[in-house]
Amino acid sequence: MKYTIFAVLLIAIGANLSAQEDNQQKAPPCSEKEFHQFDFWLGEWDLTWGEEGETAGTGTNIVTRELGGCVIEENFSSNDETPFIGRSLSVYRPATGKWHQTWVDNNGGYLDFTGGFADGKMTLSREAERDGKKFLQRMVFYNITENTIDWNWEKSEDGGKTWELLWKIYYKRKS
């Protein structure tokens, strides 16, 4: 009987040690390099937009990593008298090899995007329809440095052959 209890204890201890070793060897969720492709966007930003040399609007954007580092959360607000406020959640999905973003705002807007990082740019796009007419929309983050980013909101009515710039935002990291 003593030997049976001792054998059971040894098996249990061995299984527990094996499980601990497995846990130590596994990387934490969302730690692969693709999950960090949006890290350039993290932080607090002052925003300006308008024609070259003229400021038509300003705002702020606070972008954080949430939910164990797996989700990028955006909190956008214009500085207008009646602010335009929006939130987005972005996540990289290894199954698709793409980033997925959902945007909602205080005008009742809901947009869903997919895309990725290539050639120094993060591009997220979607199909849209208005008045029975289909078109593409995309946002492009480019000219990315530690303290600045350019962001374009664009539309294509010819399946992505050409793009029309609708809104350009200049990001400057808050000091």
Image (cartoon, rainbow, N blue to C red):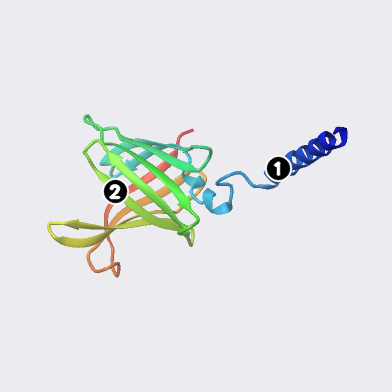
Q: In the visual, does 31 lie left or right of 170?
A: right
Q: Nearer the viewer, residue 136 or 151?
A: 136
Q: Residues within 10 Å of mark 1 (few under 14, many from 20)?
A: few
Report the residue that reaches farthest toward the top.
81
Quadrant of the image occupied by residue 135: bottom left
The residue mark sitting in front, 2 or 1, is 1
Q: Nearer the viewer, residue 94 or 130?
A: 94
In the rendered image, which quarter is residue 4 located in? top right
Q: Is residue 15 left or right of residue 42?
A: right
Q: Residue furthest left?
A: 131
Q: Which mark is residue 71?
A: none
Specify the farthest residue to the front. Answer: 1
User: Dot 2 corresponds to which residue?
Assistant: 111
Q: Secondary structure at mark 2?
A: strand
Residue type highlighted by circle 1:
Ala
Dot 2 or dot 1, earlier in sequence:
1
**Residue 129 percent coordinates (x, y):** 19, 57
User: Mark 2: which amino acid?
Assistant: Leu
Residue at 50 percent across and 49 percent down: it is 145
Task: Say left or right for 12 vs 76.
Answer: right
Q: Residue furthest right?
A: 3
Q: Is residue 152 above or below residue 3?
A: below
Q: Give how far across and how far down residue 125 sits, in percent.
A: 34, 57
What residue sits right under mark 1 in the picture?
19
Indicate left or right for 72 with 109 as reference. Answer: right
Occupied quadrant, residue 55: top left
Residue 101, image x, y percentages: 38, 48
Out of 80 and 126, give the one closest to the viewer: 126
